[in-house]
Image: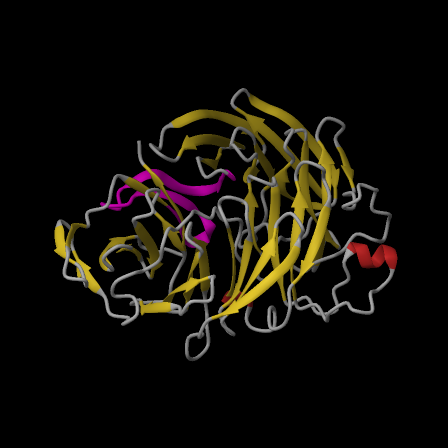
């Protein structure tokens, strides 16, 4: 199951050399591209945020693979600028807030209790930590517990501490930093589903969300989800968190539990749960068939960095849905030829020229959202995440135990940068 990820822009797509699927590999320096031109393909000074085994995060130099920030349980801020690490020490927890661009520690402090970082404010100034789970558990596969400790810390140390009944996992801060959205797992001691609620940090109380028309959700009308294939992206323009849920047959949304089932309601297999971090309401956007019918791992979600659209990919069927983040409706779908055989992984990122780059199995597919013909290339192993360089000249592609760099102008592929145990490439940032 995949946690929140930062989606970066990707300009253009894989141009020369993409349609043929061949790879031109260089080790660095000036190399001849597939169009016969020469170009310096040595990457700029950049850093990679990678997810390793056991869900730990690390920051690595994009050229040498050397460590910039050590691997640890950690979370990345919504704006992609901070990485907050939590490390157990004695009977407490040390929190260190790093600037990703240079790895510097902006603040560090020691908290009582054994906790783990779960969520940050969009700018990374605040971090929410929760009771440490049993080995092998995660925020989306928690063990059972009847009570939860949540601590919110900033550069000055602990700001809030609440002890609440139930099995809770921090999800996101509201824009004021005074409220925290949480996943409330049911039943607490043997969870198999959850609902989204909000903690008033000043009052220390657990409260329900409101509807899109800002009325309180009545008891019994809070939708409960099982979260298979859960992925999320944060839109800083609309200040909304979009979370993709797959394999949700017969799911009933809050609006239907309040108003009654709709005659035109689809048989829901997938939807995008929208959480407004300003007004504290939630709304679900149903996805059309065949979304949710294939494996959860073959789905991905990506965000237009300018706030213009949210994209959901079903790599098994080769379908992309475009969602209006303001109207919260599906505006349309486009198709591409899916890989042959089962798709065990999928990833997606957006471009500034109407192009979506999709990783589907070993295929890296450039899909023009205008309907033009997609192009593709075959990577050495299954794609483990994709991200664009800040100048949009390179695409970084996660692979087994490494990361490749693809020059978007020439199609030249360099690397790999060795990353033993790589699970997912999360993002790339300019180093300072």
The part of the image, by quadrant, that contains residue 157 is: top right
Q: Is residue 245 left or right of residue 58?
A: right
Q: Residue furthest top?
A: 156
Residue 100: give x, y in percent of width and height.
Answer: 39, 35
Residue drawn 39% across and 59% down? 384
Residue 352: give x, y in percent of width and height.
Answer: 42, 49
Residue drawn 26% across and 39% down? 45
Residue 228: give x, y in percent of width and height.
Answer: 61, 62
- Residue range highlighted in magenta: 49-78
Q: Is residue 282 left or right of residue 108?
A: right
Q: Is residue 177 left or right of residue 124?
A: right
Nearest the viewer among 229 and 186 is: 229
Q: Residue furthest bottom?
A: 341
Q: Main secondary structure of the magenta part?
A: strand
| Quadrant containing the N terminus in the rendered view | bottom right
Q: Is residue 40 left or right of residue 48?
A: left
Residue 242: give x, y in percent of width and height.
Answer: 60, 50
Q: Is residue 351 above or below residue 102?
A: below
Magenta stretch holds residue 56: yes
């Amino acid at each position: 199951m995949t946690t929140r990820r930062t989606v970066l822009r990707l300009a253009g797509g894989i141009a020369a050399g993409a349609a043929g699927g061949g790879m031109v590999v260089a080790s660095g320096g000036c190399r001849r591209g597939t169009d016969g031109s020469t170009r310096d393909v040595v990457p700029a000074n950049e850093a990679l945020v990678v997810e390793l085994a056991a869900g730990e995060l690390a920051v690595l130099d994009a050229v040498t693979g050397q460590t910039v920030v050590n691997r640890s349980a950690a979370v990345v801020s919504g704006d992609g600028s901070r990485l907050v690490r939590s490390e157990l020490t004695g009977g407490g927890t040390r929190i260190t807030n790093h600037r990703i661009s240079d790895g510097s520690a902006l603040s560090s402090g020691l908290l009582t209790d054994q906790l783990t970082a779960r969520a940050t404010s969009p700018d990374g100034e605040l971090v929410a930590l929760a009771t440490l789970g049993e080995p092998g558990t995660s925020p989306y596969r928690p063990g059972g517990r009847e009570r939860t400790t949540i601590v919110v810390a900033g550069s000055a140390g602990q700001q809030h501490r609440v002890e609440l009944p139930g099995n809770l996992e921090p999800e996101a801060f509201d824009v004021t930093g005074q409220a925290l959205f949480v996943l409330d797992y049911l039943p607490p001691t043997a969870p198999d589903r959850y609902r989204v609620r909000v903690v008033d940090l000043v009052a220390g109380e657990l409260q329900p969300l409101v509807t899109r028309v800002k009325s309180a959700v009545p008891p019994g009308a809070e939708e409960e989800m099982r979260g298979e294939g859960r992925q999320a992206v944060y839109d800083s323009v609309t200040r909304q968190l979009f979370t993709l849920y797959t394999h949700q047959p017969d799911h009933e949304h809050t609006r239907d539990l309040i108003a009654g089932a709709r005659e035109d309601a689809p048989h829901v297999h997938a939807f995008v749960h929208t959480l407004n971090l300003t007004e504290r309401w939630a709304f679900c956007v149903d996805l059309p068939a065949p979304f949710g019918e294939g494996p959860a791992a073959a789905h991905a979600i990506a965000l237009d960095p300018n706030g213009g659209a949210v994209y959901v990919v079903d790599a098994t069927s080769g379908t992309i849905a475009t969602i209006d983040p303001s109207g919260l409706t599906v505006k349309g779908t486009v198709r591409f030829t899916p890989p042959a055989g089962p798709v065990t992984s999928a990833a997606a990122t957006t471009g500034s020229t109407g192009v979506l780059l999709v990783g589907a199995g070993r295929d890296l597919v450039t899909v023009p959202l205008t309907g033009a013909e997609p192009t593709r290339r075959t990577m050495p192993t299954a794609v483990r995440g994709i991200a664009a360089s800040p100048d949009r000249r390179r695409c970084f592609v996660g692979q087994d135990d490494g990361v490749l760099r693809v020059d978007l102008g020439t199609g030249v592929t360099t690397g790999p940068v060795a990353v033993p145990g790589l699970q997912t490439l999360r993002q790339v940032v300019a180093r300072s």
